[in-house]
Image: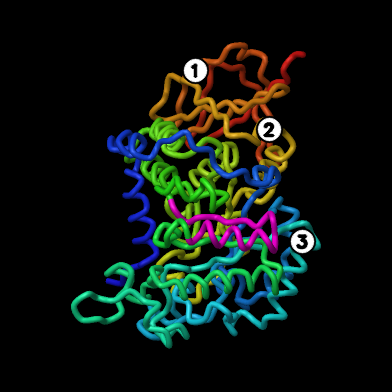
Amino acid sequence: MKRNPHKLRCLVAAFLTGLLASNSAVVAAADSTNAVARKSPDWLKKAVVYEIFTRNFSKAGDFNAITDRLDELKDLGVDILWLMPIHPIGQKNKKGAIGSPYAVRDYYAVNPDYGTTNDLKQLIAGAHQRGMKVIIDIVAGHTAWDSVLMNHPEFYKKDATSGRIVPPNPGWTDVAGLNYENQELRRYMIDMLKYWVKDFGVDGFRCDVAFTVPTEFWETARGELEQINPEVILLADANAAPKLVSKAFDMDNSGALHSALNRVLRGNSPAYLLNRSWENTREQFPAGSLHLRFSDNHENNRAVARFGLQGALAAQVLMLTLDGVPMFYNGMEVGDATESADPALFEKLPVFWSPGGRPPLREIYRNLIKLRKQYPAFDDDRVVWLQNTAPAEVVTILRKDDKDEFVILINLVSHSTAGSVELPGAEEFTLLKIDGLPELPQSTLPEFRLGGYEWRIYHRTLKK
């Protein structure tokens, strides 16, 4: 049975967070301080991230195919394109027919299957012309076994007994671990990051398994990158490392919340686990910490395969209405169900852009993104988890500022659920019409009745 090293990473990270379990209070007590997270650009709180696996984004599998669809992505409401690793893929000890993009052979090169360096520059320029930014995936903790850095064996971790280079984790057999005690390696990696920002205009990096690299390295790297671009974006692929967002990173990937979401939508845990997860993270992290919110990505089977079409939509509605920065994985907007994770990380399995029998997901998501950007109530990190009489099935949250209040109700089970929500002035809220969905009969809060995976958003304007 093939093992997916990247799914293992996700599981390890989730375990490190305590997966919302009873140990979370201990973790919070150990890590909690009066620290404040680094101040990220205000526009980032309104941003939407779109993750792209270049190989599988199109049949062509190249940069030009992405460039051709930039207008569509802009129209959807995307602000940041996250390109999964763009570098040549190692062939020694590779997984599958092609190998994982996270087994990098040369940090300074572009995968020739994706196109040329000029193709990449045109993609970045095209995104910038449309007001979008581009970040690329950097795998700083390890390389392919046939990496050009193997010419510097002193850069790698070694077995204490045999002196042989070793993987960073026994299950990650297609990669070799880097040794950040070596100062020359640190210099090499920082210079490499600066190269992509300076020579290509890349706006930042998503840093794979960032917690496997010393925090002080990232802090030093950020300081030097800011000399080139003061608003460089750094996204940490990490869940249990509050120190990373104190100085080095703009946000982490909130993997603990995603683990809770999986448990709830698979029927293994009650819906209120999501509230507990959110609260646990709030206790662990510095004040003002920003988190990436996702329901689908390259490390999991597609959300529509895990949760069903309506369940996947409900999950993403939650991500779009919570605090933090929501993310889409390529193909979500059409309900793509093509295999993801293993085997898609190691094979050619393009997104199917014209699936049948789907609701107009793109129109729904576009409308929700527009709503999120239009109202400052969705900008900050204040989330009120309202009490309701069906807490095992339904989440009810309030987002507000001094002008508007929004109440979001989401049924996270497949059967109908009825109840009521504790909400002063509930009768003042009006049900919003969402483009792409049939118009629903007006219903009056605090009572609610929701079909399987049904969700609703209510709004009221506050009186001056």
Residue 354 visible in the current orientation? no
Mark 3 and mark 1 in contact? Answer it, CB < 8 Å.
no
| Residue at image point 65% right, 82% down | 115
| Residue at image point 58% right, 81% down | 109
Q: Amino acid at mark 1?
A: Ser
Q: Considering the numbered disc 1 on the image, is that residue within a helix, a strand or a loop?
A: strand
Q: Which residue is denoted by mark 1 in the rendering?
A: 420
- Any magenta on residue 313? no
Q: Quadrant of the N terminus?
A: bottom left
Placement of 298 over or under 189, stated as above or below: above
Q: Which residue is denoted by mark 2 in the rendering?
A: 439
Residue 264 visible in the current orientation? yes
Mark 1 and mark 2 in contact? Answer it, CB < 8 Å.
no
Q: Which residue is denoted by mark 3 in the rendering?
A: 71
Cα distance, mark 1 to mark 2?
A: 22 Å
| Residue at image point 42% right, 84% down | 152
Q: How is the image coloured?
A: rainbow
Q: Amino acid at mark 3?
A: Asp
Q: Tell me the magenta residue range.
A: 217-238
Sort mark 1 into few (<14), some (14-19) or many (20+) by Cα contacts within 10 Å. Answer: some
> Given the current orientation, which residue lies at the most extreme left position?
161
Closer-to-camera residue (165/67): 165
Placement of 138 over or under 436, stated as above or below: below
Give the side of residue 329 with respect to residue 33, left or right: right
Front: mark 3 or 2: 3
Residue 45's image quarter?
A: top right
Q: Earlier in the sequence, mark 3 or mark 1?
A: 3
Residue 213's image quarter?
A: bottom left
Residue 284 is situated, as x and y percent measured from the top left of the image, at 41, 38
Sort mark 2 into few (<14), some (14-19) or many (20+) by Cα contacts within 10 Å. Answer: few
Closer-to-camera residue (387/361): 387
Cα distance, mark 3 to mark 1?
A: 42 Å
